[in-house]
Image (spheres, grey):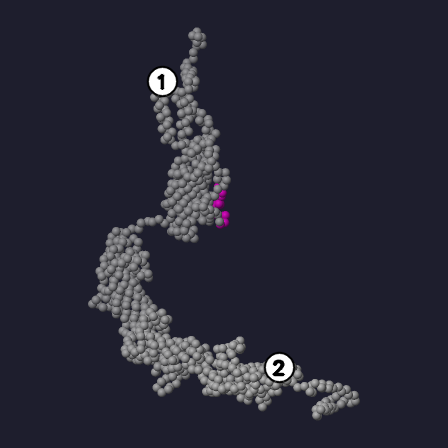
Amino acid sequence: MVSRKSSVAGENTLFSAFLSPDGKVNISWLAKSLESKTTKSLIFAKSSNEIYIKESVYLINTKFDFSIMQAKIDSLKVKIPSTLSLVRVDGENIKDWNLGDDGILSVNLYEKIDGNYNLSIGTEKYRDIDETMFEIPQFEVIGAQREDGEIIIKAEPSLRVQVEKKNGVTQIDPKEIGNRIDFNEFVSAFKYFRLPYTVSLNISKIKPKITAKQNILISFSETIIDYYTNVNFTIKDAGLFKFRFLIPDNFRVSEIANDNIVESFDITKEGDSTILTVVLKNKAYGDFILPIHLETDKEDKAVSNNIPKLLCLDAEKEDGIIALSLRKNLKLSTEDIKSLRPISLEELQSLGIRAIDPKNEIAAGYRYSTTDYSSILKIDKRSTKIIANVERNIDIEEAVMKINDVIRYDILYAPVSKFMIELPALIGKDAVITGDNIKEKRFSTDMESNTGIWEIELHSPILNQFVLNVSLENKLPSVTTDNKISINIPPVKVLDVFNESGVISITKSPNLQVTAEENNLEPIDSKELPSTMNKDQSVLAFRYLNHPYSLSLESTKHEYEKILDTIVNQAHFDIVVSNEGIAKTEGVFKIQNTNRQSLELMMPEGTDKIFSVFISGKKASISKGESPRSKIIMLPKDITPGQEFSLRIIYQSQLRKDFGSFGGLKAESAEIVDIPCSKITWRIYLPDEYSYIYLDGSLSQSGIRSEPFNDINPYMQSQQVRSQQKIQLNNKQIPQQSDEQALYGLDIEIIREGRMYSFSKLDKQAYLNVWYVKKLAIFPISLIIIALATIMFTLIQNKYPADKIKFISITLASALALFILLPQGFKFFIILLLTGFVISKVPLANNFINNRLKYTKSKSKKPINPTENSMEN
């Protein structure tokens, strides 16, 4: 089938088609049901009309709730008032819609519907700003059996809307629709049950209620008057987009807020008044701040003008604060003050009003509550006022006097570009003057007064603070020790200033003594000197308030006294003595040094080997000194002056050839020449095979005896050592070798064993004398001493038999005295002697000794003839 066409004629349908050449046609049709021919759709509509009235447009949003019964429909028609413009149609299943010339909106659906259906229509109408009457438009659903609904009226806060006329409507309680509207914009609501109805509105614009509070700062410079204000608006009832101001004559707008707030501004003339109109980008409502900056030119001379004021034309009430600021070289006076109440500068500061120009200062402040305020402002130029403060530092050395003057200018009211200083002509010409912004320096001499004047000219005038430095040097006559010289201090005078005052500080070399004789100067404590001066080095200080003044010094030279530059805080020695009389010593010095480059070490007598020397764990070089015992140790350069470091030395000494059975020896330790030592400590390790009768020397014994020994002198505190021990000072390990093991010896380990005794002393010259006896020889030696004592006391008794009691008394008294006076180690021998004395009193022993003596004597005589001997028997 190429094409087909059907049309309805009455109750019949005509069908025509162009057929293909096949000759076969299939035709099928669907007959309409009897119901569709006889039943019509019933449409009921309920509408909700929301009218939002704005200053320039009416926005109408209409929602239809359809209820379709009996038969389905595929289109809806709504008549829209011709005064409205259709902007949107929303709903489900919409195929298309069309607004005819007759104002009927036809909405076609994809599928036929019945039951409930929702349709939303948006329309609008432009409004003339001056329009006062508006009649609510009515929407009619074509073919509806019944149509009712509600009308909700809203308006912008700036509009006042009143119902002028109503017919066919009933007012609704707002509570019934409270969840669907914003009551800030709600006007009224009505319900209608059929068309037509009438609701007429009277619309008028609400005038905003505006109050303004200004914070004004009027700033005066030499050539410009700046008018700064922050206008704090409070806007009620309605918002607005523009503000109008009356600005002072001859003022121009410099700046108004910023581009985010202001759309534009315009200045117009209305008669003799200048009107500033500011248009905002957004409507202002509630609290709103608008900053404005005006300015005008001013002649650089004394002026007298009425106080300028910016007035808010639309404000019902205006008040504010006015602050006046001006340059320091300007003077302000006021006359004919009206409706202005003065306020303090402290109150202005508490309100946050400060001078915007850093060169200005707040001079006055006023508060006004009405806009009819006025006052005559007189601005005069002040003449320059310069205040000079001199900080004079005088340093007295042996051959020269150095003077450094720091002149601090405080320039008030008007800037200046020239300064003048007066000095004695002889030394003034050699003065060195420095400072910022200096263009030229000129020196001239007044022969009559014998003074010189320096003129210093700057590149540009300066205000407030300026500093000049004046340096002088004057040679002094040479002076010998303990002699005095007089020094007259040349004065410095600052010219063309309102006031000059200053302080003088005297410093000196350490070997000089300085006294002063002053006139018109006030002696002060050096602590009163400014912080910019050297208070710690000042020996004399003075203050002057005006000229003239004079100051002469008397300087006396003294010789330097040598002070301590190096000290040994502690020296410790571990001395290990062998049976062969060889002592191996490890010594550690804790030293503080400021400027010495080397140390001279005096070794003990008999030192034959130095194994190694370390400074803070690093090898150090050692060389021979002037004597065989003197050794020179060079200090490394990386030692911080005054910081403590360690010197560690290991050496060997020959104390005696060998110990033998008994005897004595002297032990010494190395010491640093010409350097005091705060404390010396020893740990001496002696062979354990010997008993030590007495230890005496320059050291005092310290430490605790850890275990008892069966010694001749058990009261000597000692400790038996069988394990290795390291030196520690103040609970800190001494640094061991930390660099390469080459050159200057090795870091050897000294085996510490034997009987350890601890000693200590203050300062230097540490030595120890040791008397000893071998433990295995104590018993035979004791027997020999007892035997000799017994024989001695027996012989004495036999020789003086009549004085036995006297002899016994003298012997016991002598023994007791020796027992008390002799050191502990020798008391053992006193006991042996007393033992011999007691044995000599035993009859058996006495007879035995006497018989032996007689026998010895008889044998010493010539031989006896045996015949004679037998005859006698």
- Type of residue at label 1? Pro
Q: Is residue 195 above or below residue 403?
A: below
Residue at screen point 33% across, 61% down? 531
Q: Quadrant of residue 502?
A: bottom left
In the rendered structure, does residue 860 fall within the stretch colored magenta?
no
Where is residue 74 shown, x and y percent of the image?
A: 65, 84
> Is the magenta region chiefly helix, strand or loop?
loop
Q: Nearer the viewer, mark 2 or mark 1?
A: 2
Q: Quadrant of residue 457?
A: bottom left
- Type of residue at label 2? Ser
Where is residue 529 shown, x and y percent of the image?
A: 30, 60
Drawn side of residue 226 relative to residue 3, left or right: left
Is residue 427 or residue 95 the one in the foreground? 95
Magenta residues (range): 739-750
Q: Which residue is mark 2?
A: 67
Q: Which mark is residue 500?
A: none
Q: Given the current orientation, which residue lies at the most extreme right position? A: 23
